[in-house]
Amino acid sequence: MSVSKEDVKHIAKLSKLNLTEEELEKYTTDLSNIVDFANELSNINVEGVKPTAHILDIRNVFRKDEVQPSYDREEILKNAPSKDAGCVSVPKVVE
Amino acid sequence: MDLYSLTLTEVAKKIKNKEVTIKEVLDSVYSRIKEVEPKVDAYLTLTQELAYDRAEKLQQRLDNGEDIGILGGVPVAIKDNICTNGVKTTCASKMLDNFTPIYSATVVKKLEEAGAIIVGKTNMDEFAMGSSTETAFAKDTKNPWDLTRVPGGSSGGSAAAVSADMAFASLGSDTGGSIRQPASYCSVVGLKPTYGLVSRFGLIAFASSLDQIGPFAKTVEDAALMLNVLAGHDKMDTTSANLEKVDYTEALVNDIKGKVVGIPTDFITDGINKDVRAAYDEAIETLKNAGAQIKEITLEYAKYSLATYYIIATAEASSNLGRYDGIKYGYRTKDFNDLDELYTKSRTEGFGPEVKRRIMLGTYVLSSGYYDAYYKRAQQVRTLIVENFKKAFEECDVIMIPTAPNTAFKFGAHDASPLEMYLEDIYTVPVNMAGLPGISVPGGFDTNGMPIGIQFIAKAFDEKNLLQVAYAFEQNTTYHNERPTIEEGK
């Protein structure tokens, strides 16, 4: 296995996902298979090749910093799972 | 002849000439939906009330002598990862099952400005992650050509809706083949435009450097008409290209004498179904007979596209899907003690297995110690793929390859091995890696009667050449005239 159970536990934690023991087994196998497959890239000579993050030659698209009409607060809050006094409400963060 | 079976171009003309009313067209489509949707399950939401309201208003304007646009009164469908103001947009995920956007995507606005009427939102793989629409949260969409088989994915609902005459055209999104592969499986035309040609504003992101919105249609002509409406710069999308307006219908000339069509012989090798191979060889003959020049080319790095894709796409997805935390919108778990538990439980309960697999793979390739070996290397190989295509297009006008190595498979066929399913995208993924335009056109049937798609690829922003060759291919074949039975196959 190129990806260990410990690896999967770690990345699940980073991804903020809980896994059952059964899922942990399954994802360890799946991710190992995919990573093994992806390892074919290690045979390619990429020395001196520039990485492509984005296909278009567009960068730093700026706009003027001007105030413009935006969305209605009440409308936006309609999608919030929990709200209070015109705000999204969350559990207490600071003790 | 029933109105629903017309093409988009035909029905738009009939409405404009007042041979039919918009209400009659809408009635026909919704009665067709009532008849076949229970078998196909292409839609997640139907917007009947809004559609009839709009039909009435458009008809009034038309009767007053106003121009109601080139898609005036034509019913279309929208993939459920494209935001529609006031209409639920779920990405076929439990995570967004209660999400109603407060704005419309630019493409939706453009369609509406051109007079189109939205009949509903279509099913898809959850967050567009999949090749069969089986990862959808609520239900499976069936292939209209054989209800025991998948429609392809991730835009399976949009492909099936057009294939089964439940819309004249639809929108999909294509990150690694999600328009072209289901178009191939359902025998419709599916066009993935050049990255940047069509605004992504309002498309719920999967992999931002690869995602592109495009149309499904019954014919190449209809697809060109849709592209005329969809293409164009949008200040709300910083990756949107600012180019001069092009009339893509000018490309609809059945003449490809002298056009050079590239055949990447080194790329089409093992693992291709023999019926697909035969259809591809026949397609080469068709183009030759139509006067095209066939030229063998090489794409030596194309075979690495899939591995590259599953690193880059999952990395971008793991980042894009970080926003689903149960706070501002989307699913929130009922039971939690603190903020961290709220995040983790909301995500664990809200995402399906394929989405979790990809988030974790993406997190893995970006994590410290693996970044250089996987993510950076994949981006370097992406450069090699881009250069491969650039070189190939010095020798030819368009490239032709099959859309998918196989035809539509049975439900559950790839449950045991996600990797096997990923291999279905082998011929579509390179196009996204290089940001090029690609189109799938009906190109035959296998021995089970399942559709085969032929894919054309062109240089960036060269949709005209792409559509011209696709159009000539279509006009010199008859596969697009066949309609599905909407029954269970053998």
Image (tube, rainbow, N blue to C red):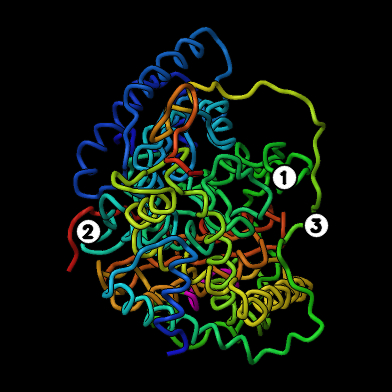
Q: Residue at x 28, y 53 (%)?
A: B141
Residue to which mark 3 is pinned: A57
Q: Residue at x 47, y 38 (%)?
A: B328
Crowdedness near tag 3: few (<14), some (14–19) or many (≥20) residues, C-alpha within 10 Å: few
Residue B196 lies, in percent from the top left, at: 68, 50
Residue B182 lies, in percent from the top left, at: 41, 59
Q: Residue at x 59, y 81 (%)?
A: B304
Asked whether the beta carbons under mark 3 and mark 2 sit within 8 Å of each other, the answer is no
Asked if residue B144 is positioned above or below residue A40 in the image, the reply reads: above
**Front-lying residue, B404 or B99:** B99
Asked if residue B245 is positioned above or below residue B392 in the image, the reply reads: above
Secondary element under disc 1, as helix, strand or loop, is loop
Disc 3 residue type (three-letter): Asp
Q: Is residue B400 visible?
A: no
Residue B238's disc is: 1
Q: Main secondary structure of the magenta part?
A: helix
Tell me the quarter of the picture where residue B111 sits.
Answer: top right
Q: Marks 3 and 2, how far apart in space?
A: 44 Å
Q: Name the front one of labels 3 and 2.
A: 3
Crowdedness near tag 1: few (<14), some (14–19) or many (≥20) residues, C-alpha within 10 Å: some
Q: Is residue B44 visible?
A: yes
Whether residue B371 sits left or right of residue A10 in the image: it is right
Label 3 is found on which chain of the structure? A
Asked whether the beta carbons under mark 2 and mark 1 sit within 8 Å of each other, the answer is no
Disc 2 residue type (three-letter): Leu
The answer to whether dots 1 and 3 both sit on one chain is: no
Q: Which residues are magenta?
A: B280-288
Disc 1 residue type (three-letter): Thr
Asked whether the beta carbons under mark 1 and mark 3 sit within 8 Å of each other, the answer is no
Residue to which mark 2 is pinned: B147
